[in-house]
Amino acid sequence: MARHAGVSPSTVSYVLSGKRSISESTTRRVRESIEALGYQPHAGARSLASRRSNVIALVVPLRDDVHVPVAMRFAVSVVTAARTHDHDVLLLTQGEGPDGLRRVAGSAMVDGVIVMDVEADDARVPVLRSLDLPSVLIGVPEDTDGLTCIDLDFSAAGALCVDHLADRGHTDIAFVGQPPSVYQRRTGFAERTLAGFESAAARRGVRATQRPCSPETAAEVAGALLRERPGLTGLIVHNEPSVAPLLEAFSEHGPTTPDLSTVVIGPAPAGLPELTSVDLPAEELGGRAVGLLMDKIDGLGKPGTTLLEPGLTDRGSTARRS
Amino acid sequence: MARHAGVSPSTVSYVLSGKRSISESTTRRVRESIEALGYQPHAGARSLASRRSNVIALVVPLRDDVHVPVAMRFAVSVVTAARTHDHDVLLLTQGEGPDGLRRVAGSAMVDGVIVMDVEADDARVPVLRSLDLPSVLIGVPEDTDGLTCIDLDFSAAGALCVDHLADRGHTDIAFVGQPPSVYQRRTGFAERTLAGFESAAARRGVRATQRPCSPETAAEVAGALLRERPGLTGLIVHNEPSVAPLLEAFSEHGPTTPDLSTVVIGPAPAGLPELTSVDLPAEELGGRAVGLLMDKIDGLGKPGTTLLEPGLTDRGSTARRS
DNA sequence: CAGGGGTGTCGAAGCGCTTCGACGATGAAC
DNA sequence: GTTCATCGTCGAAGCGCTTCGACACCCCTG
């Protein structure tokens, strides 16, 4: 390669990295040779010499109570964003747990790591702290000390839904949440949404109940709510796969939207009437997470938690009550 | 590391790789040092010296007409299987197209690649041929010359469903398929399923129609079938996300399962009554694909297409007609 | 016109492994 | 008691990059 362009290897390196100034004529000559030879630097050699692999790891959850399409949107947006920063993405699954992190860190395979689906008391967090590997969490654990986290402000999202309904005169609202297992392992986003819901409900003085739910138990949950809460007029669903079975179950014995005013937190489900929702900005989260990670890799950026402001899109599934 | 164990670096390497015999005592001493120091070989150095990265690339589709949970199951099973072969997985998206393949191959980042969601006339296939990078396709293109492919035998799956219904006395069957866009870009599995359906229907002498479908158009499709095919008693759905809206639409104006005998090709949808189905063995496919790729990387294994025999699980959603 | 500060390029060292040939030691064969 | 394999280990030579001085060379200043 260097010979083909008539320069030394170091000059090629400097052309590629831009770390020293190179004359325009030499630069052009080198670029032409790169083009002509289809030259690609050897990734291993590069990472050995520069102590940078230009790869980041992404730890994706694979629990079955995690909503898969959302996880996939995250993954894709992370890959796309990483590519714009000239990085590739190594896919790790929860299967290996903390050991996977140790392995990729220890062998210098990756420059940093993005961890999704963080729990309040996550086993990976102490490992991350001990590893001095740049990392960004999508999700917020209980103790964020020294960590860089980013997430939707789920607490605000819960409150936003309550306010939306309360503003429209609703005084009896139910929150249908994630499957029980999600709360049991104290997943951050689920806890925070619920907390936001509850404190907003108290603040607005509305009657509020809350129930976990999964697609299998949706009919049951709807039945119980209809029975125990005859005055119910507002519904907040923080569980996308359950939205369809839930609304179906309600409509069999009771009101349909917008009389049962419904707000969904999460991505809008396909093949259903459009519902008013607080959308999960997966693409933005993924992109921002990568940006934060790149800063940390470059030695910039301080630890801290970024919460994205939620936005509510009114699609007409909530009615105004006098 | 080598010093800590009191041996030369090459001895450590041979202990780790097993490429030369090392005495039991030395092996033990080295392993103890590895343990004590938490030693991890530098991946870049290793790939530079050995010309092996121990990483494979996985190209995942991100079209919105691809069923995401299935793609995710593939991805996870590929990662899991790769780990058992001491490899990691680099995630590539369709976004970069053939260039992504060239990049990871040229820079020796990966030892091989697994490509999902292959079309009959896929742009990546010629690139793969030109690259002399070991590869395995999950899916089957039109021209498989020189390629290693693996997939469910979708043609047999289509036929299996027809036979199942025909055996139970059904003589008027509809096939509800993938969204039109999937056929337009000539995705292998969709074409082959349809072909299997049609030839089996001809062989069994049953009346057969076929329609593309998406969750949005499910109600429409159901309506059209009810209108145009009053004698319809059998339904084959090769489109998991549409199953729920489809059956709902049918039940509003017509028969429900098992009177409308329904067979699904794909993963069983959650939160619905259990349906008789031909399951997509994503885990097995992913695992086998990795196995095939590892053989190719090791210089074993010839090109060729492996089709997995489909199996039908009877869950009682098909009735016998006299 | 000597001295000083940029620029643009090169050479060499080294990143941390693997691998090949070599070599001493050991035991078997004659 | 030689001779020969065989076994276990080592040393050295890379793998293909990056990076750090060094060094021409040029232009500016005084």
Image: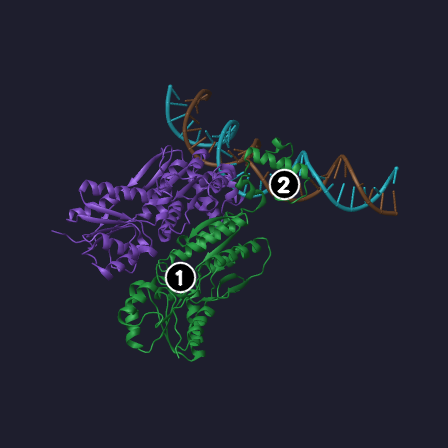
Chain colours: A green, B purple, C cyan, D brown
- Image position of B30 (left or right of B241): right
What percent of the width, then of the height, locates residue B251?
Answer: 23, 60
Label 2 crowding class (10 Å Cα cut-off): few <14, some 14-19, many 20+? many
Circle 1 chain:
A
Q: Quadrant of the N terminus of chain A?
A: top right
- Badge 2 marks a residue whose secondary structure is helix
Q: Amino acid at mark 1?
A: Ala
Which sits in the foreground, A251 or B50?
Answer: A251
| Labels 2 and 1 in the same subunit | yes
Quarter of the image for residue A22 reads top right
What percent of the width, then of the height, locates residue B121?
Answer: 39, 38
Give me the residue at 36% from left, 60% from top: A65
Quarter of the image for residue D25 reads top right
What percent of the width, then of the height, locates residue A139?
Answer: 47, 62
Could you give the CA–CA distance between mark 2 and mark 1, rounded to whole angstroms?
47 Å
Label 1 crowding class (10 Å Cα cut-off): few <14, some 14-19, many 20+? some
How many tags in the picture? 2
Q: Amino acid at mark 2?
A: Val
Q: Which residue is mark 2?
A: A15
Of callouts 2 and 1, which one flags the residue occurring earlier in the amino acid sequence?
2
- Image position of A30 (left or right of B108): right
- Image position of B174 (left or right of A71): left
- Image position of B264 (left or right of C18): left
Residue B133 visible in rendering: no
Mark nearest the camera among 2 and 1 is 1
Q: Quadrant of the C terminus of chain A?
A: bottom left
Q: Relative to B176, does residue A218 appear above or below in the rendering?
A: below
Q: Which mark is residue A268?
A: 1
Q: Residue furthest left?
A: B322
